[in-house]
Image: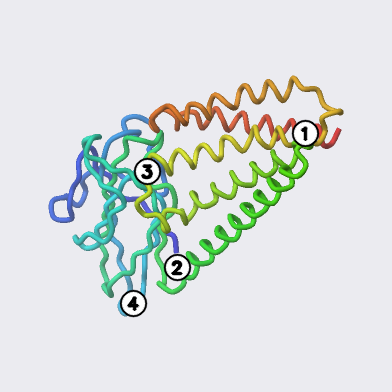
Amino acid sequence: MATNHSFVFCQPKFFSAYNLPALAGEIFPIPARWNAPPLTRGCGTLRLRILLPAGAGGLALRLPDIATASRVLINGHIAVETGQVACAEEGVVERLQPQLLPLADAETIDLEIQMANFADRQGGVWGPVLLGPHFILERERQVSQGYEALLAGAMLLMGIYHLFLYAFRSSDKSPLHFGVFCLLIGLRSLLTGERWLLSVLPDLPFWISFRMEYLTGYAAVPVFLQFFHSLHRSELAHWPRRLLSMAAWPACIAVLVLPASYYTRTLPYYQIITLVVIIYILSCSVF
């Protein structure tokens, strides 16, 4: 079941189960993102008391990404730390990673989520907190990881295959563009969702993985646009491709040179560009 309940939220410092008054703070629905001042940056504590029926056992909590560093306490004991939380920016170590936490048999669970965000344009809990039988949540996680690994493997193999095609026939640029597009999507699928790559490389710095997540998504749009034009070069005008590419590549450059707190703000702008590119490709395909 999803714990789509309201947490108690206290900001701008951390509280523990032993010094947080029962009615302190404001009611905060989950899932939700910090998307308006003063919740875009800073730290805070979410608290929820879960009452279980007698005899309930073998349960677990599945936590989504919590931006961009978190510490989870269950009944006053630290269950997991993702990165390092602090209320000062210099003390935060960012990391995003979904978690699965087995629960000890108890009728009352005090869940606390301490969060800190100074990197992303939207902090907070990015998805539902799931409570259910451990074996079911574990199976769902394994299925999700398997799907993402299968998608990544298929896209990476297709990308390498098309790059080899281009190496043997460089006069045709379409295999090059499609191969690069497949590599970008394959790599991105390892950096999102269950974040499989971070499970394999747990010491991969956040600033690298987060830039790669944005850059692979951003660069895939103009690369696929170039692939589409390479297939229909004699039929389509060049100026729409050039105009859309000129709008897209600056956001990619921003990801490379700016801090995360700045380049994440380009996402709404880039979503508009992506939508325009999709409409353009569909209109050209139909008409």
Q: Which residue is mark 1?
A: 230
Residue at the spot 48% in from the left edge and 41% down from the top edge: 212
Indicate the position of residue 207 as horizontal and vertical percent values. 38, 39
Residue contact at pointers 3 and 2, CB within 8 angstroms: no
Sequence order check: which comes first, mark 4 or mark 2?
4
What kind of residue is marked 1?
Answer: Ser
Q: 248 or 14: nearer the eye?
A: 248
Q: CA distance from mark 1 to mark 4?
A: 58 Å
List the single residue furthest toward the bottom.
55
Image quarter where the C terminus lies is: top right
**Residue 130 rendering spot, x and y as whole percentages:** 42, 61
Q: Earlier in the sequence, mark 1 or mark 4?
A: 4
Q: Which residue is mark 2?
A: 137
Dot 4 and dot 2 residues touching (CB under 8 Å): no
How far apart are the alpha carbons under marks 3 and 4? 36 Å
Q: To which residue does mark 3 refer?
A: 206
Asked if residue 173 is positioned above or below residue 21 in the image, the reply reads above
Circle 3/circle 4 CB separation < 8 Å: no
**CA distance separating discs 3 and 2:** 26 Å
Residue at x 75% of width, y 38% of height: 170
Q: What element does badge 3 sit on?
A: helix
Check disc 4 and give the amino acid type.
Gly
Position of 182 with respect to 18 (left or right) is right
- Where is residue 76 shown, x and y percent of the image? 19, 60
> Which residue position holds label 4?
57
Mark 2: secondary structure? helix
Element type at mark 1: helix
Distance between the alpha carbons at the discs numbered 1 and 2: 45 Å
Amino acid type of disc 3?
A: Phe
Asked whether disc 3 touches disc 1, contact meaning CB atoms under 8 Å apart, the reply is no
